[in-house]
Amino acid sequence: MSTLNFDVIDPIIEYALKEDIADGDITTNAVIPGEMQTTATMTAKADGVVAGLPVAEKVFCKLNTNIEWTTYIEDGSFVNKGDVLVQVKGSFRALLTGERLALNFLQRMSGIATETSRYVKAIRGYKTEILDTRKTVPGLRLLDKYAVKMGGGTNHRIGLYDMVMIKDNHIKVAGGITEAVKAIRPTTAAGVKIEVETTNLNEVEEAIAAGADIIMLDNMDNETMKRGVELIKGRAKVEASGNMTLERVKDVAASGVDFISIGALTHSVKALDISMNIDVPQK
């Protein structure tokens, strides 16, 4: 997810434009002459990491193909309050009509990237990677996960189809971790990782014996996680999950886990404040 696949993302943008504009921006079309051209700038109003500039550009290009887009920074860059991110030239109508949608995408994605970067910075010096989850806005998962990458995080599975995740309900129905893994292996393509969720050290031992590729230590305290890592002894990758905070994450990384997954990166987003100022031509 270090790049954006616009074959998939274009329909998201087109739906969002239809939702916001439908048959047209009745206010702008009534007030702004169709031939009027102008220039606009997008500026960071807070410190953070920017993500989503190509998405914002695509919004305007769908409204007017003659838009000129000049970026001064790249996605994944840290910016300070007051930094100009981009200059846009073109149809006044297109810039005014697309302003809110472009900012909605850009601010949300930059908020995710900024929060991710805080967690990545907090565990600097450890081997541990920060993972995202499936706790994304429906329809926006690829954008959310791209933003995590721009913040220095690592994408976990994209959906239910690209990795096995055996959780508590699977284990209960199967009759245990061993039985669940046995049921899954014959139906799973080679190279697809099998992860098992565990909640105590007995389950960790069972997951090791079953041959799990990744073992999740779910909602364990730091000391129990450390003991879990010692039990696993490198025979599987280890993911810590549950109740992760900036204050706690360094101690979790110190336990020796390979990954820390954090749902709050995408389910509790605080948008990065970014403004767009449009020049009004003098009559």
Image (cartoon, rainbow, N blue to C red):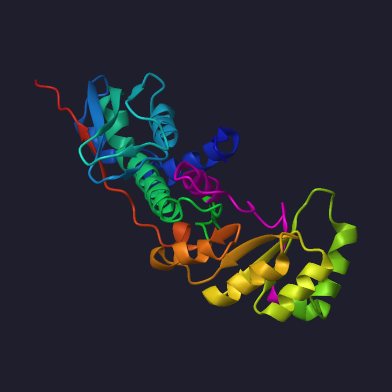
Res 134 seen here: no
Is 197 positioned to the left or the right of 55 in the image? right
For image coordinates 44% across by 36% down, the residue present is: 55
For image coordinates 56% across by 67% down, the residue present is: 241
Residue 64 in percent (x, y) is at 38, 25
Q: Is residue 210 above or below residue 101?
A: below
Residue 148, magenta (yes or no): yes
Where on the picture, by quarter, is residue 207? bottom right
Where on the picture, by quarter, is residue 30? top left
Q: Is residue 77 above or below residue 163?
A: above
For image coordinates 55% across by 60% down, the residue present is: 260
- Between 204 and 226, the one lying in front of the other is 226
Q: Is residue 246 above or below residue 48?
A: below
**Number of marks in picture:** 0
Task: Tell which residue pokes out farthest to the right in this image.
Answer: 186
Quadrant in which the N terminus is drawn: top right
Residue 226 in percent (x, y) is at 59, 70
Residue 152 in percent (x, y) is at 48, 45
Residue 14, magenta (yes or no): no
- Between 277 and 124, the one lying in front of the other is 124
Res 124 seen here: yes
Residue 131 in percent (x, y) is at 55, 55
Is 57 positioned to the left or the right of 168 in the image? left
- Between 29 and 221, the one lying in front of the other is 221
Residue stretch rendered in magenta on the structure: 141-170
